[in-house]
Image (spheres, rainbow, N blue to C red):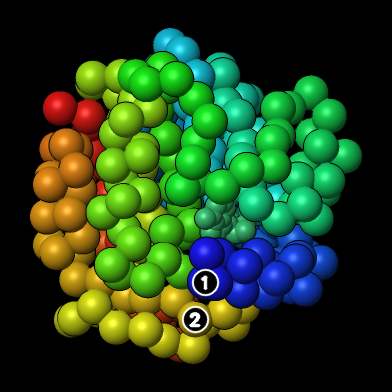
Amino acid sequence: MVNLARVRQAYASAAELYIERLGTTHQVHADDLAFIGRHLAGRPGTVLDLGCGPGHLTDHLRSVGVDAVGIDMVSEFIAHARATYPSGDYRLGSFEDLAVADRSVAGILAWGSLIHLPPHELDGVLAEFRRAMVAGGALVVAIFVGDEVAAFDHKVVTAYRWPVDEFGERLARAGFAEVERLQRPGDGTHRPHAAVAAVAT
Ligand SMILES: C[S@@+](CC[C@H](N)C(=O)[O-])C[C@H]1O[C@@H](n2cnc3c(N)ncnc32)[C@H](O)[C@@H]1O
């Protein structure tokens, strides 16, 4: 809870800048948009965009026919998303407690939003994702990659990098079978990144 409050406060303070720098799909790598679409477009049923931030990926999903709902714990982001995408569905909430029925959602996008979780809290959050998802539902996540699990100074607030294989093992333990992985090495501007898609077993 201490960490949650710290992350919420940090994003509330940085929301305006985040929206300006990263808040549209033009700022998302084309390979990432394609990856997200490949695994979530065309899914019948509700797809949750957890840690939706400015809401642009929720809107992108809706534009490809997905019944997507954006959820974030930062009210500044939810207010921005509702104003920018008025036909969308954006809710204030946290992914530790999704407030949805068991086995009720068809998919979950957690794009860059698990990065601030202290590693010992990841299993609990993945268990909550699995509880909410129908069998066969799709989970798509983006993480930062490193040789070992380690904290680093993210621009907004402390984040963690993961070896992709270790992250995949956590997914498997929570009841998700990996189906695709997309990795990009770091460059002068971006850290090493991975997207992982998995289905609920
Ligand atoms: C790096 S940003 C990613 C935002 C968006 N998904 C994107 O791709 O731009 C991380 C987001 O996760 C949200 N977040 C972090 N922890 C959360 C939690 N426990 N519950 C809900 N949202 C959370 C933050 O408020 C922030 O909007």
Residue 26 visible, this orientation? no
Decide if residue 95 is on the left or right side of residue 93. left
| Type of the residue with mark 2 | Thr
In the image, is residue 127 above or below residue 101? below
Q: Which mark is residue 3?
A: 1
Whether the residues at callouts 1 and 2 have beta carbons within 8 Å, the answer is no
In the image, is residue 128 above or below residue 163? above
Q: Residue at x 38, y 56 (%)?
A: 142
Tell me the SS state at disc 2. Answer: loop
Q: Residue at x 49, y 81 (%)?
A: 158
Query: Where in the figure is residue 139, as x and y percent of width and height?
Result: 33, 37
Tell me the SS state at disc 1. Answer: helix
Where is residue 85, by image quadrant? Answer: top right
Decide if residue 172 is on the left or right side of residue 49. left
Name the quadrant where ligand 1 sits: bottom right
| Type of the residue with mark 1 | Asn
Where is residue 38, by image quadrant? Answer: top left
Query: Where in the figure is residue 141, as x and y percent of width and height?
Result: 37, 49
In the image, is residue 12 above or below residue 157? above
Q: Residue at x 13, y 45 (%)?
A: 172
Where is residue 151, by image quadrant? Answer: bottom left
Decide if residue 107 is on the left or right side of residue 93. left
Task: Name the quarter where the C terminus is drawn.
Answer: top left
Observer-nearest of 40 and 188 = 40
Which residue does the numbered mark 2 point to in the structure image?
158
Tell me the mark number nearer the camera, choosing from 1 and 2: 1
Q: Residue at x 82, y 48 (%)?
A: 80
Residue 48 visible, this orientation? yes
Query: Where in the figure is residue 161, as x and y percent of width and height?
Result: 32, 75
